Image (cartoon, grey):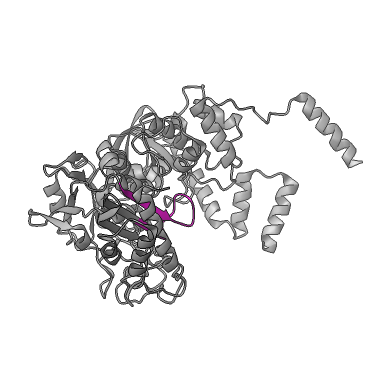
Amino acid sequence: MQAFSFTHAESPPAAVAAIAPKPHGYFLGGGTNLIDLLKEDVEQATDIVDLTRLDLAEVEETEGGGVRLGALAKNSDTANHPLIRTRYPLLSQAMLSAASAQIRNMATNGGNLLQRTRCMYFYDVGTPCNKRQPGTGCSALEGLNRMHAIFGASKQCVAVHPSDFCVALAALDATVRVRGVDGKERGIAFQDFHRLPGDKPEQDHTLAHGELIEAIDLPASLFAKHSYYLKVRDRASYAFALVSVAAALELDGDTIKQARLAMGGVAHKPWRAAKAEAALIGKAATPENFAAAAEAEMADAQALEHNAFKIPLGKSAIVRALIRAKGEP
Amino acid sequence: MTRDEREVLDEMKKAGVPRREFMKMMGGAGAGLVAAQTLMEEQTYAQAASLTGGATAAPAVGVPAVSVKFMVNGAEKTLTLDARVTLLDAMRRHLGLTGSKKGCDHGQCGACTMIVDGRRVLSCLTLAGQADGKKVTTIEGIATGEELHPMQAAFIECDGFQCGYCTPGQICSAVALLDEAQRGEASYVTEDLQNPPKQLSDDEVRERMSGNICRCAAYPQILKAIQKVHQGRPVAQDWGFAGPKHLAAMKEEARHAGV
């Protein structure tokens, strides 16, 4: 780990001012990913600004009936907050499925959005990786790619985004509130926050250097009654998803008024399953219609050498998540 | 196993060499270099800590430093450290508190678990600077004087370990788990998120302890120990120290076996 300076930010503008001029400056939230990346020499920092003293840790109602998640609220506090448990149980479930109790106590909401892929070649500094070192090649493309993407990948990168929280946020149409380097605040629709790799896999998201996430806004909840987060993984706990599905339904009797589906473990960003959603609107909430929706989405999936299992697994996971969201066992 | 390693193991059996010496020898045989380095570092730092009464050596000249003032097991401590030092290394190397273990050093095993401001965290992924102004409890601070914390006593009673390396982390994690349950926190296996159980099922405890790995797989006994404290579930101690009678009988048996 190379030497870096460590300071505590006293205000959001001061934090931005401290990091923006430093090309290798980093904001520090919980540190559960960044400290590890620094130890592995995947990232090199010259300056670290600890954000955790900033007054951005609240979870509170907004005027439009939604909820604002402070960027520095811990994952465990957010998942267990009464507003989240009652109005956005999908989000609670997704957060509680992630990592371990210790990590959830440390990790912040803002930091969760900025965690890097767990592709082993990204972590192994002895191998080529376009995300870590642009232009060197992708080791996973022809390597061990069991954990990798089936949607939206490029020849430059087949890594997947590791977050569960973000999959639920994608399904819930969240907005990321950001303080810019110019001091102006702006909102980024969640679908526009993370990127597909294309020919710039080193860029996970659309934030500019020095921009600070202050909060994540959730619109008024429509799905508290009918939602489910399903996570399929190699172990029963404390593992990243092979495939996960955030499913939310608004039902009128047995008819689907609105459907939201997002998938984790399948793409460089939380994958909003728009084709499956379109196939569900106006239909009866039946296993047959769920299966047709899953087929519609997964028809576009493209397997690599070792991850073809994710296609049938994805279909089953979508159907199962929708059945549970509807409220059936 | 290489021939070197076999030789070393055979030698160890003959001489009854203690574990630490064994680690050193394994290092000499080229198989456990990391273990040997860790051991040397530990010995060096333990010496430094005892020489200076827990005070710390200043970071190298030109390396950015950080000043940390915090409560460690009820006592106020002030350290000036290289900004890269983790909370785990600050405790082990600079305060001589080697109870917290460095297992993976990557946030995957839980051996370094400490309780910071009442919450269990991974000290290997926490920079010491992040703990400034906070209250840190390590395994050394769990007991009250000579009286073990009920969780420590239960781990002993239920045989909740084999090698013991993960145990400080397991116990700190389990102590915090009880508080989380008391506060009504939910887990991924909680059926009704609106009403998380205050009395945790075995499955709830397993899920909530998944961040603490035990290579010896003492999980059934760890679960038993936690439930003994949490549920007050009575547990029959199924082991005991050998008394004079047992020892005499064993000697007698060995004498006959040798004939």
Q: Position of residue B43 (x, y in %)?
A: 51, 44
Q: Is residue B140 or residue A215 the one in the foreground?
A: A215
Residue at point 31% right, 66% down?
A268
Percent of width and height locating residue B229: 51, 27
**Which one is in front, B220 or B245?**
B220
Q: Is residue B182 above or below residue B188?
A: above
Can residue A183 be seen by looking at this rendering? yes
* A191 left or right, relative to A31: left
Determine if residue A4 is in view. no
Residue A249 x %, y %: 28, 52
Name the residue rendered at 21%, 55% in the picture. A173
Q: Is residue A7 left or right of residue B32?
A: left
Quarter location, residue A57: top left
Q: Is residue B84 above or below residue A317?
A: above
Which quarter shows the N terminus of chain A?
A: bottom left
Instruction: Give the farthest residue toward the right.
Output: B259
Q: Which residues are magenta?
A: A226-245
Residue B157 located within the stretch drawn in magenta = no
From this view, report whether residue A155 is shown above or below residue B92: below
Quadrant housing residue A231? bottom left
Give the image location of residue A19, x and y in percent. 18, 55
Q: How many marks?
A: 0
